[in-house]
Amino acid sequence: MKCYLVQGVGIENLVQGERPALALKEGEVLVDVKACSLNFRDLLVIRGQYGSGPFDPFIPLSDMAGVVKAVGSEVKEWKGGDRVINSFFRTWPGGRLRSSWARTAVGAAGVDGVLSEQIVYPAESLVKVPDHMTWEEAAALPVAGLTAWSALIVHGKLRPGQWVLLHGTGGVSIFAAQVAHAIGAKTILTTSSPEKAKLVKEKFGVAETVNYRDVEWPNRVKEITQGSGVDVVVDVAGGETLAKSLHICNYGARVAVIGVLDNPKAAISVVDMLQHQIAVKGIYVGSCEDLRAFSKAAEAIHLKPAIDKIFSFSQVPEAYRYLESQKHIGKVVIKVRP
Ligand SMILES: NC(=O)c1ccc[n+]([C@@H]2O[C@H](COP(=O)([O-])OP(=O)(O)OC[C@H]3O[C@@H](n4cnc5c(N)ncnc54)[C@H](OP(=O)(O)O)[C@@H]3O)[C@@H](O)[C@H]2O)c1
């Protein structure tokens, strides 16, 4: 079975390799992987900034879409030919995350990921692909899509007419723009690129854009919302961006703390939070139950994930470098088999 292996720190240590055919246990499913998608986390992993210490070679990436090849003796819910995506955690069925489940996040040292011709996965941690989606689109759902859903819907309780603040044009933020638009909310998106600003308005229903490199951007957001501030923040940046986002929240706003594109440390104002009664929650992708709900909703609203570029299985290092260049809008995907 062909796969990629991370043998050390740096994209030059991402190499094609072989692993023995996988054995199937009673509650597991063997999946022929069709497509995988990349996330910012995969750059942190390959740079050695995710976890610490020496590690054995492991298979990277956490998101795939594929077709069921065989099922274990106890598996009733899947059969050969079913189209599935995987949950980011091999085990997080639903409810509150537990520490033993948190350690089952795939695609980092110690837990093999999905950039392989085949994977074996627990049956209860797979979800049906929305009927209208291609393999490449479906492979974008497990992390970026579900994180946006967890932020806007599960925590954010977003309603039509409310204002949402999004940062950047990466995988999570573009999914959030699409979901928010579909339910009739209004989005303000920050981007460093005037070209991307134009495109997200045309293609993803973003109402307004501001440049996060302009120090005046929070004032612009206040103006756009006619002084009231935003109702939901999907914060993939941390640092000063998070602090400024908290300062321009409406009363009763919900803030989803997701990422560290700006800085993992932030000096935030307690007064901003208490005076405006802001609910701040850290998001860690989501459970399989939430992925199932998101996948059903994606089918109902006919969501078309924004795929920026598709690379072949032999071009995986190029795909990593492309993601690193931040030229993309939405998702970067690898076609594993035709
Ligand atoms: N907690 C979780 O469960 C979870 C899940 C998924 C992702 N994340 C985190 O969320 C973040 C985004 O992930 P992703 O996969 O969507 O990333 P991505 O696709 O790599 O997004 C990159 C884009 O982010 C924008 N950006 C870069 N620096 C920025 C800054 N200082 N402020 C605002 N935007 C900035 C840029 O947009 P422009 O080119 O438009 O400027 C860039 O193109 C990462 O930190 C990731 O680790 C966390």
Image (cartoon, rainbow, N blue to C red):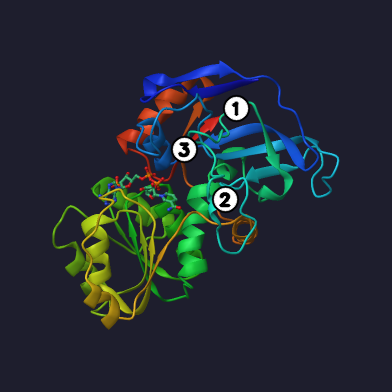
Q: Vertical placement of 190 versus 319: above or below? A: below
Residue at the spot of label 1: 116
Report the amino acid beneath label 2. Ser
Q: Which residue is drawn at 35% across and 54% down?
A: 236
Question: For residue 167, which quarter of the picture?
Answer: bottom left
Q: Which residue is painted at 61% across and 54% down in the image? A: 92
**Disc 3: CA contacts within 10 A as few (<14), some (14-19) or many (>=20):** many
Q: Is residue 304 among the parts visible in the rendering?
A: no
Q: Which of marks 2 and 1 is nearer the N terminus?
A: 2
Tag in front: 2 or 3:
2
Q: Mark 3 points at which residue?
A: 38
Q: What is the quadrant of residue 177 in the picture?
A: bottom left
Callouts 2 and 3 close, C-beta under 8 Å: no
Quadrant for the C terminus in the image: top right
| Mark 2 vs mark 3, CA separation in Å | 25 Å
- What amino acid type is highlighted by mark number 3? Leu
- Judged from this view, the residue extending furthest toward the left is 215
Horizontal side of residue 31 vs 107, given as left or right: right
Q: Kindly identify the residue that appears in the image at 67 percent across and 19 percent down.
A: 20
Instruction: Please name which of the two marks, 3 or 1, marks the residue nearer to the observer.
Output: 1
- Quadrant of image for the N terminus: top right
Marks 2/1: CA–CA distance: 25 Å
Q: Position of residue 58 (x, y in %)?
A: 52, 27
Name the residue beneath numbered marker 2: 100
Q: How many other residues sit within 10 Å of disc 1, few (<14), some (14-19) or many (≥20)?
A: many
Position of residue 175 measured from the top left corner of the image (x, y, whole percent): 46, 54
Is residue 49 depicted above or below 224 in this figure?
above
